[in-house]
Image (cartoon, helix red, strand yellow):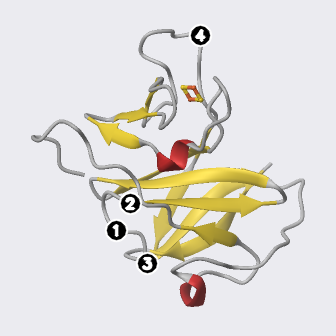
Amino acid sequence: MLKYIRIFDDGDLKPGKSAIIEREGEEIAVFNYKGKYYAMCNKCPHKGAPLGEGRIEEGVLICPNHEWRFDIHTGQCPQNPELKVTMYPVRVHKGVVRLGVEDKKSVKGGAVGKEEKKVPSHLKVTIPTIVKPINPDETL
Ligand code: FES
């Protein structure tokens, strides 16, 4: 069963930025792409690079290591439809951004990173410096 946990307030993660949320040893990359939030497993299915440090071009997330591509909306690889990154639902309600996760795990850990004061103390959040798109027409 899905449970929605608070990750930060709307506005904490600016458009074009990503955050890596650690929960029970599992990392989830959260992106603000053009004002909407998307969350996916932070581990690239190729060799495990942190997808939260990738760049996004025209709705496609590009892995920082070997540039495998994944649709930011679906997690699907456009070149190989059988390849998909796990996506997590994100909800924004009354100014709070919540991440949908399976309810089977308890939440542990401590908050770190630039937004330390704004995130709940039960989550570890890091804000990586993501690479800007190469396409000069693309705005995040
Ligand atoms: S680790 Fe992501 S493409 Fe190789």
Residue 135, position as x, y percentages in the image: 17, 36
Q: Nearer the viewer, residue 59 or 57?
A: 57
Task: Relative to 32, say whether 123 is above or below.
Answer: below
Circle nearer the viewer, 2 or 3: 2
Q: Name the residue under label 1.
A: 14
Q: Nearer the viewer, residue 8 or 125?
A: 125
Circle nearer the viewer, 4 or 3: 4
Q: What element carries label 2?
A: loop
Amino acid identity at mark 2: Lys
Circle 3 crowding by C-alpha within 10 Å: few under 14, some 14–19, many from 20: few
Q: Name the residue under label 4.
A: 82
Is 90 on the left-hand or right-hand side of 120? Answer: left
* Residue at (54, 42) in percent of width and height: 51
Q: Do the residues labelled 4 and 1 touch (CB within 8 Å)?
A: no
Q: Do the residues labelled 2 and 4 touch (CB within 8 Å)?
A: no
Identify the mark nearer the N-term, 2 or 3. Answer: 2
Is 62 on the left-hand or right-hand side of 91? Answer: left
Q: Is mark 1 on a helix, strand or loop?
A: loop
Amino acid identity at mark 1: Lys
- On residue 17, the disc is 2
State the CA–CA distance, disc 4 to disc 3. Answer: 36 Å
Q: Is residue 102 visible?
A: no
Amino acid identity at mark 4: Glu
Amino acid identity at mark 3: Gly
